[in-house]
Image (cartoon, rainbow, N blue to C red):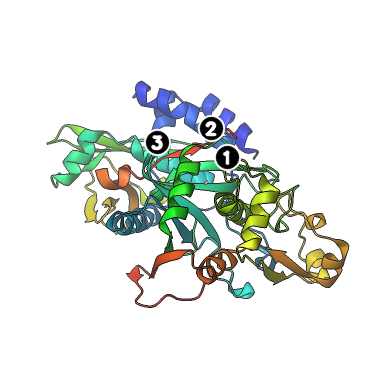
Amino acid sequence: MPRIADRLLPLVLAVSAAAGPLAGTPAFAAVQSDGLSRQSEASLAASVAVPAAAAHALSQGARFSVAAAEVSAQGAAITLSAAAAGTSIVVALSAQQAARLGLKVGQAVVVTAVSAGWLISTAAGEALCFVPNPRARALLHSERMDT
Amino acid sequence: MNAKVHAHALRRALSAPLLAAMLLLPPSAAAGTRCENLVIGADRLAAAAQTALTVADALDRRDAPLALVARVGTDLSAQGLVYSHVGFVVRDHAAGRWTAVHLLNECGSDRSGLYAQGLVNFFADDLVNQDARIVWLEPALAQRLADRLRALPQQSLHQPRYNLIARPGSAGYQNSTAWVLETLGAALADDAAGANRAQAYRAAERDGFRPDRIRIPYSKRVLGGLFGGNVAFTDHPVATRLGGDYPVVTVRAIVEYLERSGRVQAQQEWRRGRPMERLGAL
């Protein structure tokens, strides 16, 4: 975990200096939509950090369930574990979402294979996260050039 | 909250494992303003990845080193426009097999950066829908552009002062479509290697480029509160500002010019996830 944290911390700071969409710009003036979305940057880079073992387990149809839920005012970290495969994925939720979903340790989640990877949802059908497959993962990167 | 402050506060407030966990994967709800550190929804990310794979497959099927790819990030129907952003996509770029090379505005500010991004990132950027168009260019032009973009940041023709409604040919400002057009123009210029921005724009004009015009009446400009850091009306002459018809480089203007000038080899388009037999409006 600390290793992943080391990788992601600079990323948080990097994306802080990036940009957002043009929400709020009156439609009559919006002739471009070239605002970089920090949301995308953070979450997309995070998707790449899913352990390969977890992606493999998903591809093998492993069953995942909630193994831990760490909640703070800033948000919740939900650990989804495939006990049989010995691997886990940590999903970030907003504190509000976590409270609303009320995920409990031991609760099963639903894995749905889609063309570009897997969607993990609650039994009620609310998507918790998307894990890209290797083909999609190869198309996930972002670099700002130093011009 | 200021984004940088937000990040620092996060760093202080959270243990490293929790911070890592919070960033690891997106929740399903995405909301907030342009500079907040929120994340894209899982369903939307899956849709973007689907579009990225579809577009990459189409790019793989043709033997071309480069194409233009357009996306729909903002509903521009009030302006009669469909596509709101276009970038180049380069085969076998150092950053990845198919890499989008494009200019992005930073945080609604008056600054921009050039980015090399994967196609998932390109189609995940808070888009209105997942419609997409690929425009393949004539082979010689595509090769010159690919060589040029693989060599970035050399001769980038990038003006980091951003203006959403940049005047075509403006020296003081640039937006994403203007950068694409000028890069095209540079590849067409007599001295392709040495062309500056003005020469690149003139080369595109000589090749047949004509700007689009959008109407922003003075009253709306004032009442609409258009004082954002990324909009500079003063880039345009007083007569334009009084008249309210602003020349701009739109995706439509670029693609229609390339079609007129015989620079397009082929096009493909997807609407609502389905390939279109006939191309739709730009």
Helix, strand or loop at label 1? It is loop
Would residue A102 appear left or right of B190 to someone viewing this image?
A: left
* Residue displayed at 43% across by 24% down: B16
**Residue B94: which disc?**
3
Residue beneath disc 2: A14
* Residue displayed at 71% across by 55% down: B169
Would residue B175 appear left or right of A50 to someone viewing this image?
A: right
Q: Which of B26 and A80 is in front in this view?
A: B26
Label 1 neighbour load within 10 Å: few <14, some 14-19, many 20+: many
Label 2 neighbour load within 10 Å: few <14, some 14-19, many 20+: some
Residue B122 in sight in this render: no
Residue B174: % across, % down = 68, 50
Give yes or no for contact between labels 1 and 3 (Cβ–Cβ under 8 Å). no
Residue A89: % across, % down = 28, 37
**Residue A18: which disc?**
1
Query: How far is mark 3 from mark 2, CA to CA?
Result: 21 Å
Amino acid at circle 2: Ala
Helix, strand or loop at label 2? It is helix
* Residue displayed at 74% across by 53% down: B170
In the picture, the quarter occupied by the C terminus of chain A is top right
- The chain containing the residue under callout 2 comes to A
- The chain containing the residue under callout 3 comes to B
Q: Quadrant of residue B203?
A: bottom right
Would residue A83 appear left or right of B235 to someone viewing this image?
A: left
Query: How far is mark 2 from mark 1, CA to CA?
Result: 7 Å
**Residue B245: which disc?**
none
Give yes or no for contact between labels 2 and 1 (Cβ–Cβ under 8 Å). yes
